[in-house]
Amino acid sequence: MPVTVSQEQLQSQFTYIDAVAALIRGKQLRAYTHTFGCQQNEADTERIRGMLHEMGYTMTDKPEDADFILFNTCAVREHAEDRAFGNIGALSHLKKQRPDVVIALCGCMAQQEKNVEKIKKSYPQVSLLFGTHALWRFPSLLYRALTEKKRVFDIGGEDDIAEGLPVLRAQGPKAWLSIMYGCNNFCTYCIVPYVRGRERSRRPEEIEKELRELVAAGYKEITLLGQNVNSYGKDLGLDIDFADLLRRLNAVPGDFWLRFMTSHPKDASPRLFDAMAECDKVAKQLHLPFQSGSDEILRRMNRRYTAEEYRALIADARAKMPDITLSSDIIVGFPGENEEDFQQTLRLVKDVRFDLLFTFLYSPRTGTPAASYEDNATSQEKQDRFERLLKAQDEIVAERQAAYQGKTLRLLVDGTAKGPEYPFTARTEGNLLVCVRGENIQIGQFIEAKIEKTSLRCLFAQKL
Ligand code: SAH
Ligand code: SF4
Ligand code: F3S
């Protein structure tokens, strides 16, 4: 059973929220947050913003105006780490001009010893650093950073679940809903299990309660989050799995779409696709990363499925939901990948014909097994494979997008667009981006619209 942070522990943090509020009362302080990384990190930032809001901070989107600056960081690839360090580096002059500014760093990078050492040594402008496990202790940590004249570091903590933290969500009709935390899979390239801890599932009644609140607050698209949602419930000791959870949440009254991510092919099952097909609120959309089309590479990635098994899953999903949109993640240039391995990836991409692909160049992560695997391909070869993959996928997407021409679809309007001709953005049930025009369009509304033209990245529609 996952451990839930006790009421007493949480209560003491609420006391610190009040203490910070008293400390800054009348000062009209502003807070700026910036999130790197995945949706889980975005959801965490929303909790921190919720706590800051309760303390009396006003949010700003300009770091130079802020009294409190937070970077919630990602460690999944070197590029993400470099960006975080670059951003913090750029703030050293601000800290010199306004020594009272509190600069904080949290998230996945803060769970790694090497980064903590680097911050301690080379980034004195960071006065508060805490890891993913310490998120719920943020009020006491900020209180210390504001009152003590020394830097505060908290990277310890257990794989606990904290329920009932305040949350300040981004504007718009979409909301994240974490159903579980952590990962047990230890894919050999991946840092996530090391920085997020072991899998732990929230209790179903807590999830349902939060969903009901979101629906009552008017949210129209709710995405269930977990690193591997298909192993939901395994740690709970209750008779519930992810398919059961979907059915339970689908029964919550209201007009909304439910999405979820991420699924792992080793745990996705016909049972899941049955539930998706039967649940009218569950969007017919699936993000199912396969990473590589080569069985040998998959084995060395510790993914625990074969390309053939993956194809069978896709075939089953499509048989049950013919219009389903499919997306995937792929890593190019994993150590030892040769041209033939890459060709198998390319073949899988061409056979499945995904609507959307997220392609990454392999980035070695210190502490993961793959970081010490022998790697023979040159960066030029890897780059060349990467570009061939993008080109193949662009051709597929162009065809798939063109097939929407003239169709009438239900859309959720979710924002404003840049161009004047189609002033709003919307999403299809399959999560494809649409720019829309028409009379009386409101953000947060479901509308019927007809696709007038298509491009590689966007569909263009007229509201009916
Ligand atoms: N839990 C999710 C997502 C994990 S991170 C899942 O298992 O699908 C998102 C993606 O980043 C992964 O799917 C993978 O494609 C990519 N990724 C992870 N580690 C990486 C690394 N070291 N180098 C390059 N890409 C990586
Ligand atoms: Fe990383 Fe694999 Fe876990 Fe996804 S399933 S977070 S890729 S270890
Ligand atoms: Fe990055 Fe952490 Fe998410 S490493 S991808 S922010 S879980």
Image: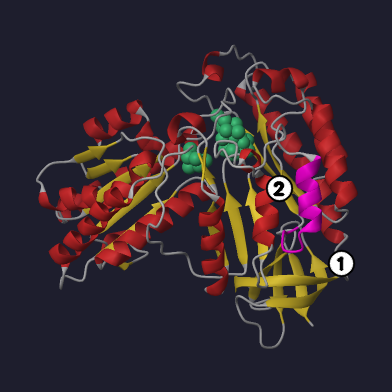
Please name whichever residue, 128 or 166, is drawn nearer the observer in this view of the structure: 166
Mark 1 lies within 8 Å of ligand 1 (Cβ measured): no
Q: Position of residue 327 (x, y in %)?
A: 73, 46
Asked whether residue 274 is drawn in magenta, I would say yes
Residue 192 in sight here: yes
| Tag shown at residue 242 | none
Neighbourhood count class around disc 1 (C-alpha, 10 Å): few under 14, some 14–19, many 20 upward? some
Q: Start and end of the magenta stretch? A: 270-283
Query: Label 1 belongs to which residue?
Result: 405
In what element is the residue under mark 1?
A: loop
| Residue 151 drawn above or below residue 209 | above
The kind of residue tagged 2 is Ala
Q: Quadrant of residue 31?
A: bottom left
Q: Position of residue 144 (x, y in %)?
A: 16, 48
Query: Label 2 belongs to which residue?
Result: 243
The kind of residue tagged 1 is Gln
Please name whichever residue, 3 or 409, is drawn nearer the observer in this view of the structure: 3
